[in-house]
Image (cartoon, grey):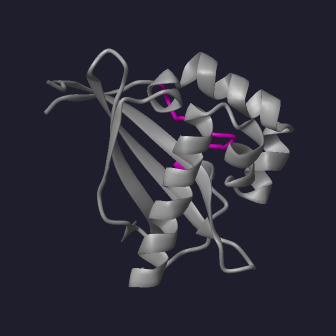
Amino acid sequence: MKRLLATATLLIGFAGPWWTSAMAVDAITTADAIAIHDAVQLQLEALANDDADRAFELATPEKRMLIGSPDRFLRLIKEQYNPIYRYERAIFSSAEVIDGNAIQIVRVTDENSKVWVAIFWMQEGEDSRWKIDGCQLLETTSVSI
C-alpha cells in the first residue's frame, strides 16, 4: 500500500517525532499498552465531541505549553488534521516500542471513507500516566468500503 505523508507531522498540540521530548522506552507491559490505548482513544473521543479541554489534557505538558490553549489545539485539529477530528472508524494496533519510542498506531477512516494511519508518540509522565507527545498522520491510497 502506497502511503503519502499527508503533512510533515501532525502536531496534536505537539512537535514531530524527531522533536519529541519522550524518554527512551525498553518495553511496554500489558498495563502500559492498555493505558496507551485508552489515552489515545480518550483523545479521539474528546476531539469528536469538541471537548477541547479533555483532548488538550491528554497531551504532554511540553506540548500543551507549545500550543498554549485548548481552543488553539482544537482549532489546529479542525483546520489541519480533519481525519482524526471526526473520524468514522478507528482500528488500533497493539502499542509497541520502536527505536526506544512508545507508539500507538491507529488506522482511521475519515468521513469520505479515505483511510489514514496515525502514529501517536507516547510519553509516560512522572505520575505514571501516558500522554500523547506527538502524532504523524499518513494518508493511504485505500478506501474503506
For residue 111, above or below residue 47? above
Query: Residue shown at 62%/42% (left/top)?
Result: 46
Residue at the image position 31 percent from the left and 65 percent from the top: 94
Is residue 12 a member of the stretch shown in magenta? Answer: yes
Q: Which corner quadrant holds the N terminus? A: top left
- Whether residue 128 is in magenta: the answer is no
Q: What x and y, as percent, mark residue 14?
A: 66, 43
Nearer to us in this view, 53 or 24: 53
- Using residue 59 as the reference point, say whether residue 97 is left or right of it: left
Tell me: 35 left or right of 73.
Answer: left
Q: Nearer the viewer, residue 19 or 131?
A: 131
Number of marks drawn:
0
Q: Is residue 103 left or right of residue 54?
A: left
Please name the residue shown 41% across and 68% down the image: 99
Q: Confirm whether residue 114 shows in the render.
A: yes
- Residue 75 image point, x, y percent: 71, 23
Q: Main secondary structure of the magenta part?
A: loop
In which quadrant of the rendered image does the C terminus lie? top left
Q: Position of residue 23 (x, y in %)?
A: 61, 72
How far across and down, in percent of the image, does residue 24 sit? 54, 75
Q: Residue at x 37, y 66 (%)?
A: 95
Q: Is residue 27 visible in the rendered structure shown here?
A: no
Q: Which residues are magenta?
A: 7-18
Residue 70 lies in what quarter of the image? top right
